[in-house]
Image: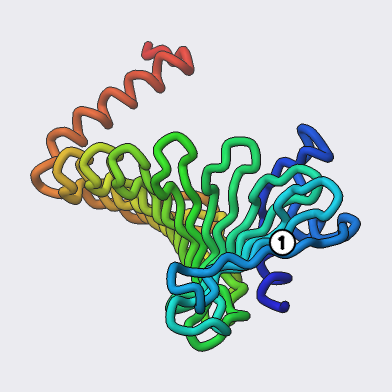
Amino acid sequence: MNALVLAENLPVKFVSKTAKNEYVAPIEIEKLPKPEIRKETVYRRNKLSVDRVIEYDAQTGDKLRVVHYDYFNNEKIRAIDEFIPHSGKKYRTINYILYKSIDEFDTDTGKRIRTINYDIRNENRVTSIQEYDTETGKIKKVTLYRRDGQTISTIKEINPKTENVIRWTSFRESQTISSISEYNAQNGRPSKTTYFYRDGQTVREVHNYNPLNGEWKQFIRYDKHDKIIETEVAPKYQSEQEKENIAQLIDSLYNKNLRFE
């Protein structure tokens, strides 16, 4: 399926028993020799509707795939669990509830490492990817895609312990960085936002905030040669900035060993 190919082209790591300490993507797993399959059908309590169909390696007995069916429709697939041949470790679950999504797992710990979400109207178009912290099981990073399902719009990084956003990176359609916003990990307040020129590397503006309460403190604008062309400090923080400027000037004088005669 095209959707799976799209997912496999995205950066992902899996540990396979057949290649210890080496990372392999789903497409590599699918290239492994196909074993002979034995199927087992599990019915619900009413003995009429199918709950799931389990596929095993006929020789080793290892589980290869489990197809889960909708409770009200025997022909509608609800989810598919996939396992690595010759190891029996689950590496992926494809969900078809409301919209298509793919959960991928660390094959050593069994913990979910990321979820790929697809458009409800087009299962070939990726809308977002969630990455998980294996210690807490909570989301640590969210990548949002544009309507083409390939170019990144935004990357949101999260502190999994506090669940506060710590970094927000926005991209232009050309995939250069437009801006980076940084936040206090403990209270979620903004601390700094950096805007870039179209090359995505040269800093255009920097906005500094008080990380304790999120109040705006200072604005600095640069030209394309990294030279400050404009700066402004919030009135509340002007005396504080003057002290910092004097301290920086003194440090600069001592560092350069300048003498006044």
Query: Is residue 196 visible from the viewing direction of this image?
Result: no
Looking at this rendering, what residue extends furthest in the bottom direction? 121
Please name the residue that numbered disc 1 is placed on: 55
Residue 90, placed above or below residue 150:
above
Task: Please tell me whether mark 1 sits on a helix, a strand or a loop.
Answer: strand
| Left or right side of 135 for 220 | left
At label 1, counting other C-alpha atoms closer than 10 Å, the crowd grade (few under 14, some 14-19, many 20 or more) is many
Q: Where is residue 97 in the image (x, y as percent from the top left)?
A: 45, 74
Residue 243 is drawn in which quadrant? top left
Please provide percent x and percent y for residue 101: 53, 69
Residue at the far front in the pictured view: 47
Relative image position of residue 192 (x, y in whole percent) = 32, 47
Q: Which colour style is shown? A: rainbow
Give whichever of 50, 10 is nearer the camera. 50
Left or right for 81, reference 111: right
Look at the image and tell me in which quarter the N terminus lies: bottom right
Percent of width and height locating residue 23: 75, 43
**Can you say whether 8 is above or below 260 in the image?**
below
141 left or right, relative to 9: left
Q: Residue at x 74, y 56 (%)?
A: 56
Q: Which of 48 and 35 lies nearest the eye of the viewer? A: 48
Front-most of residues 131 and 110: 110
Q: Which is nearer the eye, 253 or 129? A: 129
Q: Which residue is drawn at 54% across and 64% down?
A: 116
Q: Residue furthest left?
A: 236
Q: Quadrant of residue 15?
A: top right
In this view, 65 is above or below 97: above
Q: In this view, does 209 lie to the left or right of 142?
A: left
**Residue 7 visible:** yes
Q: Residue at x 48, y 83 (%)?
A: 120
- Give amino acid for label 1: Glu
What residue do we see at 57% from left, 42% from top? 110
